[in-house]
Image (tube, rainbow, N blue to C red):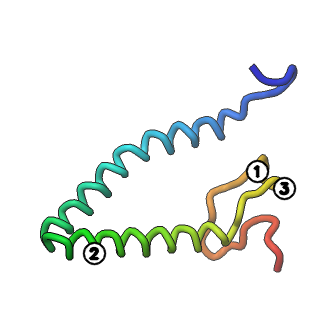
Amino acid sequence: MGRPGATVRWAVAGRMVTAWLITLPAAAVAGALMWTVADLIGGTAGAVTIFLVLLALSALMWLRSRRAPVDHTNVNDEWDAPVPGREPAGAAS
């Protein structure tokens, strides 16, 4: 389906499938947790609380994504899972 001579990077495909398999159950658990918290608080206060929690978590995820942004210069680079205490390859010192 791709260019002649192109190879499939099975490690990348495997990571994509793993991410897909984790996403739906994780979304279900997060949704159930948010519903439970909102139900315990009750009414408009519960809805507003959940909105603020999700807004804060979204901001946190966005800020963490800026640590190693993916753009047109590195989108096809190989990558390894980060190792705590070790700087990622290619990071400026």
C-alpha span from label 1 to label 2? 36 Å
Q: Nearer the viewer, residue 60 or 39?
A: 39
Q: Residue at x 71, y 64 (%)?
A: 69
Q: Which mark is residue 56?
A: none
Q: Amino acid at mark 2?
A: Thr
Q: Nearer the viewer, residue 12 or 27?
A: 27
Horizontal side of 50 relative to 46 (left or right) equals: right
Residue 34: horizontal and vertical position, in percent?
Answer: 26, 63
Q: Nearer the viewer, mark 3 or mark 2?
A: 2
Residue 61: horizontal and vertical position, in percent?
Answer: 52, 68
Q: Residue at x 22, y 60 (%)?
A: 35
Location of residue 49 (image quadrant) = bottom left
Vertical arrangement, residue 73 with respect to residue 10, above or below: below
From the image, tell me which residue sits under label 3.
73
Q: Residues within 10 Å of mark 3 (few under 14, many from 20)?
A: few
Q: Residues within 10 Å of mark 2 (few under 14, many from 20)?
A: some
Q: Amino acid at mark 1?
A: Val
Q: Which mark is residue 75?
A: 1
Cβ–Cβ under 8 Å for marks 3 and 2? no
Vertical arrangement, residue 41 with respect to residue 32, above or below: below
Image quadrant occupied by the C terminus: bottom right
Q: Residue at x 29, y 53 (%)?
A: 29
Image quadrant occupied by the N terminus: top right
Q: Which mark is residue 49?
A: 2
Vertical arrangement, residue 79 with respect to residue 38, above or below: above
Q: Residue at x 29, y 70 (%)?
A: 50
Cβ–Cβ under 8 Å for marks 1 and 2? no
Q: Who comes first in sequence, dot 3 or dot 2?
A: 2
Cβ–Cβ under 8 Å for marks 3 and 1? yes
- Element type at marker 3? loop
Residue 90: horizontal and vertical position, in percent?
Answer: 82, 66
